[in-house]
Amino acid sequence: MKNLFVKNASGIKIFSFLLIMFLVFSCSKEESPLPLTITDKSSNDVTLKKTRVYTETVCFEGTSNFGAYTAKEHRLVSDSELNFLLMTAKLTHVDGQNYILDTEESVPLPDGSLMLYRKISFNVKITPGGVIMFSWPETWWELGTVRGDVLGQIFDHTGCIIYGSGINKGALNYKGYFDGNKLYAYTHFMGKQVNPEPEMDLWWNLEGPVKFNFSINLEVINCP
């Protein structure tokens, strides 16, 4: 992706079109505004007030955010508050706790229009208490092409072999909550750089392990 979007006092600006067009992935340290606790150890650590099955289609808008940090250098390589894509989504009930979350991510252009960047359909599980879990699918649509191998794509962009609790069977695993109004999901994982000069020069010559934090941040809207 060739553009990074920066939020400042004047609004969203285009910072580096090369960065976000190639940086296709989402969680910096973010706090939930709701009375709940989410940890990396267990989704059982979530307490929500609402219990519900969503049988009708639910529509959302928000952002997908992409952060990374190197502790040894104390360097914020990618600020998730600045590096993001605009997202719209629809949640459709399948059966029981199973849902499909269809997402579209877009790049805002200087003339105010949006360029469709990526479409993904996630197989989502939502518990009666609101805990949400899903994995990155094997294939997705991106810039007119069906793509696959998300870990390989991250390696090409960053030069990092990734590992950790957010990775399973070659996919990124997300977890979070949906309270009927806000949907928040994140994945955390580590990376070891073995190629010091990958596709994106932002990621050149990193020292020590890299902590990746990707997230999806959505709010319910009226369906069109």
Image (spheres, rainbow, N blue to C red):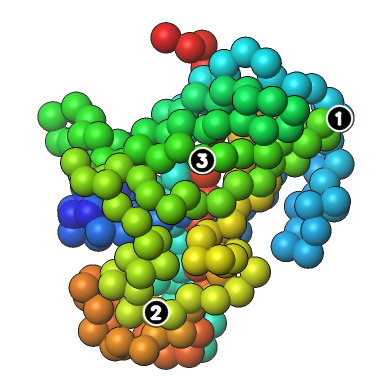
Residue beneath the point at 43% across and 80% down: 161
Could you say whether the residue bearing mark 2 is in a helix, strand or loop?
Answer: strand
Asked whether the residues under the numbered discs 3 and 2 touch, taking CB atoms below 8 Å apart as contact, a structural biologist would say no
Q: Residues within 10 Å of mark 2 (few under 14, many from 20)?
A: many
- Report whether 206 appears left or right of 35: left
Q: Residue at x 63, y 25 (%)?
A: 94
Give the labeled residue for mark 2: 160
Q: Is residue 68 visible?
A: yes
Give how far across and how far down residue 100 sits, in percent.
55, 31
The disc, 3 or 2, on the residue closer to the chain's N-terminal end is 3
- Residue assigned mark 3: 122
Q: In this picture, is 204 found above or below 121? A: below
Q: Amino acid at mark 3?
A: Phe
Compared to 189, does 132 lie above or below? Answer: above
Crowding near the residue tagged with mark 3, few <14, some 14–19, many ≥20 C-alpha atoms within 10 Å: some
Residue bearing mark 1:
49
